[in-house]
Image (tube, rainbow, N blue to C red):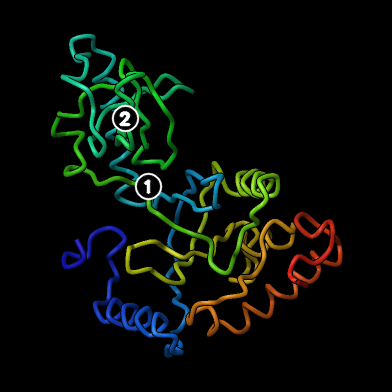
C-alpha cells in the first residue's frame, strides 16, 4: 500500500520512516534526537469515534474511500434485507475474524472484526472497522462476511487510528468523560479538516483538528478548545516534532494558563502540575 501510495500513504516518504525509527532509537538510548519539523498536510475528515478510556480517536478521510463506503453500505443493507442472505455463522467466531454485525443502536448491518470471543456466553466483542466503535453482541447478531464485494480486500477499513497532537488527557474518569462529551459536541456529524502533524511508525496519525467554519489557522483548533475547557493539558514530555512547533506550543501554554486561572475542568481544585 505504501509503495502504491494508497489511502493514507498517498504522500508517504520512505525517508520519514527511517527518520522516525532513528528518533525512537535515540530516545530509547536516552539521547536527544534531532528535531524534526511539524508537517503541513491538510485532509478533509469526519471524526467517527472517541475512545472513552484515553481520548484516542478514529477518523474517516473524505474522498474516494468514503464515497466507496457509502456505495458499499447501501449494497450491504440491501443484501441483508434478503432473507436468503441470512445464514448464521458456520461455527464459533475467532478473534481476528471479519464478520457482518447488527449494530444494537440502529439495527443495521456493518462490517466488523472480532476482538475477543466468549464461548461460554456465546457472545463476542466486535469493532466496527469503518467507524471505530465497538460493542459486545450475541453470536445470533453476527453473520459471515464471505461476499467478495464487501471484503476488506475490496475496500479497506475506513476508520483510521489517530490521536490529538499536543494533548495529554486527564486520568480522572469524570474529566475524561467530560472531554469525550466535549469532543463529540465540537466534532461529530460535521466535516472537519485535520492537519496531520506527524505519522507514527505504526501508522497512527497525530492531528490538529480544525472546524473550517471558524478556524483561521492551526492555532484556532479543536485541540486548543479542549485545553481551554480544562479537559486536557499540554504534555510535559514532548516529542521532537512537538518541541519544534514553538509558536503553537506557546499559544497552547497560554490557553492552558487561562484555563488554570479560571479553574476550568481538571484545574477546578488548583494546578495539578505543581507537585
* 2 or 1: mark nearer the eye: 2
**Along the line of sight, which residue is nearer the eye, 73 or 202?**
202
Q: Which mark is residue 117?
A: 2
Residue 75: x %, y % from top left: 26, 27
Left or right, 128 with reference to 75 = right
Left or right, 226 with reference to 17 = right
CA gap between label 2 and label 1 equals 22 Å
Q: Quadrant of residue 230?
A: bottom right
Which image quadrant: the N terminus?
bottom left
Provide the residue designation for mark 1: 159
Q: Secondary structure at mark 2?
A: strand
Q: Is residue 103 above or below residue 114?
A: above
Sequence order check, earlier mark of 2 and 1: 2
Residue 238: x %, y % from top left: 55, 77
State the count of labels. Answer: 2
Q: Which mark is residue 206?
A: none
Residue 58: x %, y % from top left: 44, 49
**Along the line of sight, which residue is nearer the eye, 127 or 42?**
127
Left or right, 244 with reference to 202 = right
Q: Residue at x 34, y 78 (%)?
A: 20
Q: Is residue 223 above or below residue 11?
A: above
Q: Secondary structure at mark 1?
A: loop
**Along the line of sight, which residue is nearer the eye, 106 or 267?**
267
Q: Residue at x 41, y 42 (%)?
A: 132
- Callout 2: 10 Å neighbours few (<14), some, many (20+)? many
Which image quadrant: the C terminus?
bottom right
Residue 243: x %, y % from top left: 55, 83
Q: Residue at x 62, y 49 (%)?
A: 183
Left or right, 225 with reference to 218 = right
Q: Are marks 2 and 1 in contact (CB under 8 Å)?
A: no
Amino acid at each position: 500500500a505504501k509503495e502504491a501510495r494508497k489511502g493514507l500513504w498517498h504522500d508517504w516518504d520512505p525517508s520519514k520512516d527511517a527518520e522516525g525509527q532513528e528518533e525512537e532509537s535515540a530516545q530509547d538510548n536516552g539521547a536527544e534526537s534531532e528535531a524534526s519539523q511539524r508537517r503541513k498536510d491538510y485532509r478533509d475528515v469526519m471524526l467517527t469515534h472517541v475512545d472513552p478510556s484515553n481520548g484516542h480517536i478514529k477518523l474517516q478521510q473524505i474522498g474516494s474511500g468514503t464515497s466507496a463506503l457509502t456505495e458499499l453500505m447501501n449494497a450491504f443493507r440491501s443484501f441483508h434485507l434478503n432473507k436468503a442472505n441470512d445464514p448464521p455463522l458456520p461455527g464459533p467466531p475467532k478473534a481476528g475474524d471479519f464478520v457482518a454485525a447488527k449494530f444494537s443502536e440502529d439495527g443495521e448491518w456493518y462490517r466488523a472484526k472480532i476482538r475477543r470471543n466468549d464461548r461460554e456466553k456465546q457472545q463476542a466483542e466486535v469493532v466496527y472497522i469503518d467507524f471505530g466503535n465497538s460493542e459486545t453482541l450475541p453470536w445470533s447478531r453476527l453473520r459471515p462476511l464471505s461476499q467478495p464485494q464487501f471484503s476488506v480486500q475490496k475496500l479497506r477499513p475506513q476508520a483510521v487510528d489517530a490521536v490529538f497532537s499536543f494533548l495529554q488527557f486527564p486520568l480522572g474518569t469524570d474529566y475524561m468523560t467530560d472531554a469525550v462529551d466535549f469532543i463529540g459536541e465540537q466534532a461529530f456529524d460535521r466535516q472537519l479538516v485535520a492537519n496531520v502533524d506527524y505519522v507514527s511508525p505504526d501508522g497512527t496519525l497525530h492531528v490538529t483538528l480544525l472546524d473550517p467554519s471558524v478556524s483561521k489557522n492551526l492555532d484556532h483548533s479543536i485541540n486548543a478548545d479542549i485545553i481551554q475547557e480544562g479537559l486536557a493539558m499540554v504534555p510535559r514530555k514532548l516529542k521532537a516534532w512537538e518541541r519544534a512547533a514553538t509558536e503553537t506550543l506557546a499559544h497552547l501554554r497560554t490557553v492552558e494558563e487561562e484555563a488554570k486561572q479560571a479553574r476550568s475542568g481538571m484545574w477546578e481544585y488548583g494546578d495539578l502540575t505543581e507537585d
